[in-house]
Structures are given as structure tokens and as C-alpha cells.
Image (cartoon, helix red, strand yellow):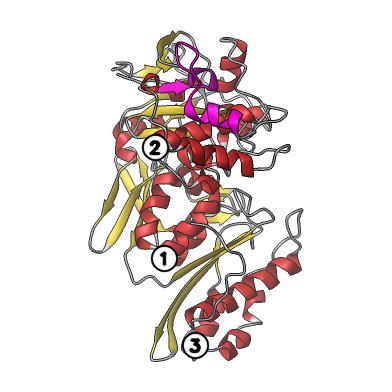
């Protein structure tokens, strides 16, 4: 593929780029910009963090799972590009020196880039902004102090990216094995003609196929240039979210509509992952531990799929057929998801070994409507309890019509085994998962009745 982008303020034009070459490998091997480190190579440690600027703003992303074609028409800035032309340090670099925020230095470039992104955008929520950067030497206190100290300094003039490259025209490989459609209509035609192609949105999942599984991807269709898949529409009755909307934007949206869902998304992944991952990708990959489907199912969300000009709509819960199998035809793709607007009865609980950006052992979502002290309607869904994201239909039935009390929750105890027979794995045993799911319902009841249930104090 032929691509153009800005690298540390200077235009770069590349010809014949492999569609699955990562930005990390190219930066280190071709440009000698070795400040960007390879750590986990799966988007977890943050040592490879770089800044990307495009029409949607400034983001920190993981270069290890960022394919080069995803940079087309954007601006990329590495740790080497944070200092000024005369060698002047960026405010966050200077603060890291003054506050002793670095020891071995391996993780430091990634931290500095994440801090520079926060500094540029005025983001002072450092616990979240730096959650995707891991350090094993200093601990985080001096790093956070450095970020706080730099916050009052102005953004350096040299950080202005100026005009992004003019890259009008279709982006595709010369051998036609990789494409980057500009619209959903173009995508629909390409997907129909290349039904075996891998659709790549944020690459936070597909990237690991390449870096960890060493898989070859014979045909690739990049979705990140389809602007009409990145639209959000809020009406009086519903919220329509395009499949290409990134999870950081979903998080911002849900803060205003379903705060408990938003709080789960704050832990869903690091800032780097949320800036790249899309809601459509998280649904379409069909993971039984994906964190988006349970709350969406509990809210009664509907999924929109498209094949050429033919569109289908279904309840999201019906999309997941069995482990590794979804109700999606060859050449068909997820176009968006619609969520009914309703009174906010939703609560979402994510249980994982690590608080931030960890895979869920169990993720439960609950929306129970109460009329005159009785359960009028219940929608309960889980991830991590079956081979697919799944509703607790028997538990819902056991609750419906009953008084909203702890006795009703206990009476539904046996119904859980009708719905779920969870597996045991490295994250949790079957027994632990079942106990956790039952306890989540109890927590929902207690919270709804006004009891204090938060045992961890989290700074906003």
C-alpha cells in the first residue's frame, strides 16, 4: 500500500507498505527511532505508546498493534518528537527529570508520550490516562507528580502538527489484497466481493493475530476511514452508534446516559486501547468475555448488519450462536447498534484480577424495573459465564412478579443453574464464577435499596 503521514512534524511517503506491518517495527527497524520500546507486543504494557493526531483529535495509542496503513493521512509523534528543534525538553520530559520519575528507563518513553497527550488535551485524570503504562521500578507516585507539575506549562509551539497530509483518493494495495474504503457503501461492495477478507477496525484484537500468533492475513479491509461508521445519533427514543465509533467516544457518551456502563468502560481497557478499539469490533469478534455485549443486551440493544444493500436487524443477544460462531453471513458486516433510551436502571459489574484493563472473569449487567415494590421486568446478561454473552432467562423469570426483596433473590438461587454452567480456567473456577454472578444480583438489589456497596475508593 502507498501511504502518507506526518512523522514528528515531517511528511513521510511510503510505497509498497505491507498491510500488516506494525508501526512499532517500522519505527525501530526502518527509521531507527528506538525510543519507542517493544514490551508485551500485545497492547498491554504501554512501552510502545505513540501519539496520533487526526480529524478526531489527539490520542495515545499502542504502536505494537497499530498497522502502518492505519496512519494514512494522520500525524504520528514518537518520544523523539516531543523535544523541540533546539533540543528543548517538553514540559513533561523536564518534569520527569526533576521529579525522579525514571529508573531503568525502559517504560519511560511510553509514560512520557501518554503524559504529553494528556498535557496537550488538558486531561488531568492521570490515574486513567496512565493506566495503560506499566512500570516495575519507581512505582507511579513520582510519575504522577511529574504529570501534575507539568500541567501548568503551555503546550510547546513545536507540538502543533499543522496541516495533515492531503491524501485524497482511494487507498489500496497494488496487488489488491488490502483496501481502505471511505464509506460504508464502498465497504459493502468490497466485503461482498472479498468475503474472506479480514475486517480491521482498531486492530486491538486482530493486531495480536499478527504479533502473537504470527498469522498471515491474505486479504485485509481497513475500516478506519469509513466516516459514516463513526457517527452517533441521539434521538428522543434511542441512541444509534456506528460500528466504527471508538470506545473512548462510547465512554464519553455513556457518562451522560448510563453512568454504570461508563464506569465499566473506564476499566474496559487503557486509554491507548479505548482510543483504537471500536464498539463494532468488540461485538463482531464474538468473544464470550467481551465487556460490551452484557450491558447492551441488558439494555435491549439491537444490532444492524449489512450485505451490499441488504440490511438486517436483530436483538443483539441473538447474534451470538455458540462459541466462535455468530449470525453473520460471508461478506456481511456490523454497521451499528441501537440502544433504547430508558430510565437508567442499568448496573454493570466487572470482576477481574487486576482492576484496570484486565480481561473479565465475569461481567454482569442488570436492568430490573420495579412497579409498586414488585419486579415488573428484568433483563440480566453476563459475559464469562458461557460460550457466548448470554441472558439469564431463568433467573429473570424467577424474579418477575416477585417482591423486590432479598427473599426473591434467594428464591431465584436454583434458576442460575438452568442458565449457566460456567467453565473453569486460569481466571476463575466454575464455582467461583457462579457464586460471583449470584452475588452481583445481590449487590444490585442492595444498591437499588440504597445500601453502600463500594468497597474500593476510586478517584474520578
What residue is pinned by disc 1?
299
Q: How far apart are the alpha carbons under marks 2 and 1?
A: 32 Å
x and y, in percent, of residue 64 in the image: 59, 27
Q: Callout 3 environment at 10 Å: few (<14), some (14 to 19), or many (20+)?
A: many
Residue at the spot of label 3: 404
Quarter of the view holding residue 8: top left
Residue 132 visible in the picture: no
User: Which span is picked out in magenta?
Assistant: 75-98
Q: Which mark is residue 121?
A: 2
Front-most of residues 401 and 131: 131
Q: Say whether marks 1 and 3 touch (CB < 8 Å).
A: no
Q: Is residue 401 above or below residue 219?
A: below
43 on left or right of 10: right
Query: Where residue 70 sits: x, y (%)?
Result: 45, 25
Name the residue located 53 percent from the left edge and 18 percent from the top edge: 80
Q: Give x and y (percent) for residue 441.
A: 57, 76
Q: Earlier in the sequence, mark 1 or mark 3?
A: 1
Query: Compared to 287, does 348 lie above or below?
Result: below
Query: What element does badge 3 sit on?
Result: loop
Cα–Cα span, label 3 and label 2: 45 Å
Residue projecting furthest to the left? 236
Q: Residues within 10 Å of mark 2 (few under 14, many from 20)?
A: few
Q: Position of residue 332 (x, y in %)?
A: 42, 41
Can you name the residue that lies furthest to the front here?
98
Q: Which one is earlier in the sequence, the residue at label 2 or at label 1?
A: 2
Q: Is residue 21 visible?
A: yes
Mark positioned earlier in the residue sequence (3 or 2): 2
User: Distance of mark 1 from mark 3, alpha carbons?
Assistant: 20 Å
Left or right of 236 on screen, residue 361: right
SS type, badge 2: helix
What's the residue at 38%, 43% (across, down)? Answer: 245
Amino acid at each position: 500500500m502507498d501511504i502518507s503521514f506526518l512523522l514528528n512534524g515531517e511528511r513521510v511517503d511510503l510505497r509498497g507498505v505491507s498491510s500488516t506491518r506494525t508501526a512499532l517495527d517500522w519505527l525501530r527497524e526502518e527509521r531507527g527511532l528506538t525510543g519507542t520500546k517493544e514490551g508485551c507486543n500485545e497492547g498491554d504494557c504501554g512501552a510502545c505508546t505513540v501519539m496520533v493526531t487526526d480529524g478526531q483529535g489527539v490520542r495515545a495509542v499502542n504502536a505494537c498493534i497499530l498497522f502502518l496503513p492505519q496512519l494514512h493521512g494522520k500525524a504520528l509523534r514518537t518520544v523523539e518528537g516531543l523535544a523541540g528543534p533546539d533540543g528543548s525538553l517538553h514540559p513533561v520530559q523536564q518534569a520527569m527529570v526533576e521529579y525522579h520519575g525514571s529508573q531503568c528507563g525502559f517504560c519511560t518513553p511510553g509514560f512520557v508520550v501518554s503524559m504529553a497527550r494528556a498535557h496537550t488535551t488538558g486531561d488531568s485524570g492521570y490515574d486513567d490516562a496512565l493506566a495503560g503504562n506499566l512500570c516495575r521500578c519507581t512505582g507511579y507516585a513520582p510519575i504522577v507528580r511529574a504529570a501534575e507539575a507539568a500541567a501548568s506549562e503551555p503546550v510547546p509551539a513545536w507540538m502543533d502538527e499543522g496541516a495533515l497530509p492531503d491524501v485524497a483518493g482511494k487507498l489500496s494495495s497494488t496487488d489488491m489484497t488490502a483496501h481502505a474504503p471511505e464509506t460504508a457503501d464502498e465497504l459493502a461492495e468490497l466485503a461482498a466481493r472479498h468475503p474472506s477478507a479480514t475486517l480491521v477496525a482498531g486492530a486491538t484484537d486482530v493486531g495480536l493475530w499478527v504479533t502473537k500468533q504470527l498469522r498471515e492475513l491474505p486479504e485485509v479491509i481497513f475500516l478506519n476511514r469509513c466516516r459514516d461508521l463513526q457517527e452517533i445519533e441521539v434521538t428522543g427514543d434511542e441512541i444509534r452508534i456506528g460500528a466504527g465509533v471508538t470506545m473512548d467516544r462510547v465512554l464519553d457518551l455513556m457518562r451522560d446516559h448510563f453512568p454504570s456502563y461508563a464506569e465499566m468502560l473506564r476499566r474496559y481497557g487503557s486509554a491507548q486501547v479505548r482510543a483504537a478499539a471500536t464498539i463494532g469490533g468488540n461485538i463482531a469478534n464474538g468473544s464470550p468475555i467481551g465487556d460490551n455485549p452484557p450491558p447492551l443486551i441488558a439494555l435491549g440493544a439491537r444490532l444492524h448488519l449489512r450485505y451490499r444493500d441488504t440490511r438486517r436487524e436483530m436483538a443483539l443477544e441473538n447474534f451470538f450462536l455458540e462459541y466462535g460462531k455468530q449470525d453473520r453471513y460471508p461478506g456481511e458486516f456490523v454497521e451499528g447498534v441501537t440502544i433504547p433510551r430508558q430510565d437508567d436502571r442499568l448496573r454493570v459489574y466487572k470482576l477481574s484480577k487486576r482492576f484496570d484493563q484486565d480481561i473479565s472473569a465475569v461481567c454482569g449487567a442488570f436492568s430490573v424495573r420495579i412497579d409498586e415494590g414488585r419486579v415488573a421486568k428484568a433483563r440480566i446478561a453476563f459475559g464469562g459465564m458461557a460460550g457466548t454473552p448470554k441472558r439469564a432467562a431463568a433467573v429473570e423469570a424467577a424474579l418477575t412478579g416477585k417482591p423486590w426483596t432479598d427473599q426473591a433473590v434467594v428464591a431465584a438461587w436454583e434458576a442460575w443453574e438452568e442458565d449457566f454452567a460456567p467453565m473453569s480456567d486460569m481466571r476463575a473456577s466454575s464455582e467461583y464464577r457462579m457464586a460471583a454472578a449470584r452475588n452481583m444480583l445481590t449487590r444490585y438489589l442492595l444498591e437499588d435499596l440504597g445500601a453502600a456497596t463500594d468497597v474500593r475508593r476510586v478517584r474520578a
